[in-house]
Each structure stands twice: as structure tokens, then as C-alpha cells.
Image (cartoon, rainbow, N blue to C red):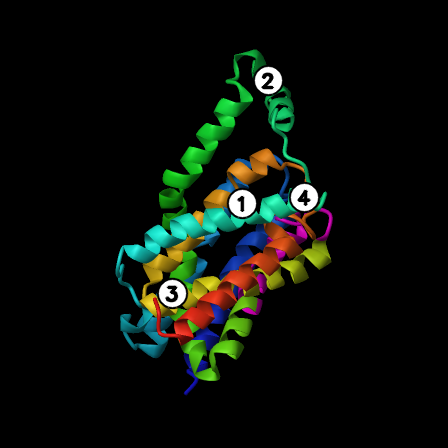
Amino acid sequence: MIDRKGIAAFLIITFTLTYAIEGALIWSGFRITDQPALYGQLAIVGVMWAPAFATVLTIKFITREGFAGTNLRFGSWRPYLKTALVIPAVFVLIYALTWLLGLGNPDWQLTDLSEMAATAGADISQMPQPLAIILGTLAITLVVTPFINSLVAFGEELGWRGYLLPKLMPLGKTKAYLLMGVIWGLWHAPLVLIGFNYPGYPILGVLWMIGLMIAMGVYLNELTLRNRSTFLAAWMHGVFNSQGYGIWRLLFPAVNPLWGGMTGLIAIAAWLGIGLWEVRRGQGGRT
């Protein structure tokens, strides 16, 4: 049976808080650029905890059901290791296809980074060699930043896959996953409208973001439910952000966001493919 009261309360709190904060930022002139204002960046990091805040308020004061249903458990270490390898591998596939299809070219000399550094007043003659920067950034995004990003992502995942997804599952897996992706995508809408992920494509960007969240959500939803772990969801989200906003943005600074890179149709197809593969594995009883 659908808990309409809990779902409604969670969504109202989450979207009201998120849109109010981001609306105030936009009203003040904040925009997503190469170097967005620091106060805005900090506010956006804080907003990532809006779903968690809504979850706590809903459970404690509205439904009073306790936190047992949010799957606050770590579970086995195996899916953490597996996803730490699989998610970067999917990014390799996405950007290899982006390159092969002529939708973006790798900046092996990091000229875009050098120009940004020079504009900021840095002495680029003291910069390490491009290969050293690339390898160092790759190593950091594989073994360091996933832990940092997963701490921030937990604020989202306690709400999305800890609270909301189990509440939607009585609708059936297909409807629950689709609705979850639409909600998750619309939650990002204010930032997309001012340049997040789809600069130059505010309206199409919102639609593409919904598509990306549906596709990526299939993979995250399936593994989260199968392992009954919200911490795993936060880990996967953190690994994704570490790759998407780390080495690949550095190496491919100029990609049409609607077609290539981590946000385009190639990425949507890749995540949907691996997500549906995991669904089939789950139906076969394998973990």
C-alpha cells in the first residue's frame, strides 16, 4: 500500500527547501560558470542534504514510523568494491564513445586548464607536466574523492533511495524506478536552468537531466534494494560524482552536453544498459 502521507510530506519539504535556497541564489545573481561564487557552491553542497532533512522531519513528526525502513546498514564490502571498479569503467566507455564519434576530443596537453590557471594569475611555468596531472587526478578520483563525495551524497541518498524509493516500490519496479528518476531530475531543475551540466540548454537540459536520472537510477536503485543499504547508494553516488566532475571534465573540457560526455545521450544509453543488466541479474537470483 502506498504511503501517500509520507511521500507527500517528504516531497513538499524537500522541494520547498531546495527551491527556496536555490531560488534565492539565482535571484542574487548566482550562475553556474567555470568558477561559480564560493558562497553559492557551499549553499549547493548544503542543499544536497535537503532530502535527508526531509526524511528526518517526515519520520519523526509526520509518519512516526521509525528509521528501520531506510536501510541504514553497510552490508557486505563486495558491492562497494565492485561499483568502485564498474562505475569508472562505464565512464571510460562513455568518453571513448564520445571521442570515437567525434563529439569531443581529449585535451592531452590540458590547454584549457592552463588557460584557466593563467587567467587566475597562476604561474603556469611551475605547473607539473600534463601527463603527471592527468595520472595524479585519475588516482585521486579513484581512491580518495569517492570517500569525500559519498559523505556529501549521503544527504541525498538517505532521502532518495533510503526513504522515497522503498515507499514507491508498491507501484511495481518499473513505475517506481521511472517516477523516482523523474522526481530526482526535477529536483535538479533550478540549477540546470542556470547552467549546471547543460550550459546553453536550459529547457532541454531539464529534460535530459530527467532522462539521465532515470537511466542512472536504474543501476543505483537495483543495487541499493538488492543489498538493502543506503550507505551503498551514497558510495555509488560519490564514485559517480568523483569521476564525472574530476578527471573526465579535466580531460574533455569541451563536449556537447546533450550528446557526449557524462550528461549526453551516450551516457544515458550506457547507464540504462548496465542498469537493465543488473535488473536481469537480480531476477536470476544472483548478487
Amino acid at circle 1 = Val
Could you say where residue 107 lies in the image, as x and y percent from the top left? 63, 30
**Which structural element holds mark 3?**
helix
Q: Earlier in the sequence, mark 3 or mark 4?
A: 4
Q: CA distance from mark 1 to mark 4?
A: 12 Å
Q: Are marks 3 and 4 in contact (CB under 8 Å)?
A: no
Query: Mark 4 = which residue?
Result: 100
Q: Nearer the viewer, residue 261 or 190?
A: 261
The answer to which of marks 3 and 1 sits earlier in the sequence is 1
The label nearer to you, 2 versus 1, is 1
Gap between marks 3 and 4, in whole Å?
33 Å
Image coords of residue 102 (percent x, y): 72, 43
Of labels 1 and 4, earlier in sequence is 1
Task: Of the two numbered discs 2 and 1 on the same chain, state the one appearing first in sequence.
Answer: 1
Identified by mark 3, the residue type is: Thr
State the image quarter where residue 70 is shown: bottom left
Front in this rendered view, residue 50 or 262: 262
Disc 1 on helix, strand or loop?
helix
Residue 26 inside the magenta-drawn segment: no
Mark 4–mark 2 distance (CA, rounded to whole Å):
35 Å
**Which marked residue is nearer to the observer: mark 3 or mark 4?**
4
Numbered label attached to residue 121:
2
Badge 4 element: helix
- Residue 224 is marked as 3
- Estimate the x, y position of residue 113 in percent, counting from the top left: 60, 27
User: Residue 191: within the magenta?
Assistant: yes
Spatial separation of the CA atoms under disc 2 and disc 3: 45 Å
Q: Which residue is mark 1?
A: 92
Q: Percent x, y for residue 232?
A: 35, 58
Indicate whether 159 appears above or below 128.
below
The region drawn magenta spans: 182-201
Q: Amino acid at mark 2?
A: Gly
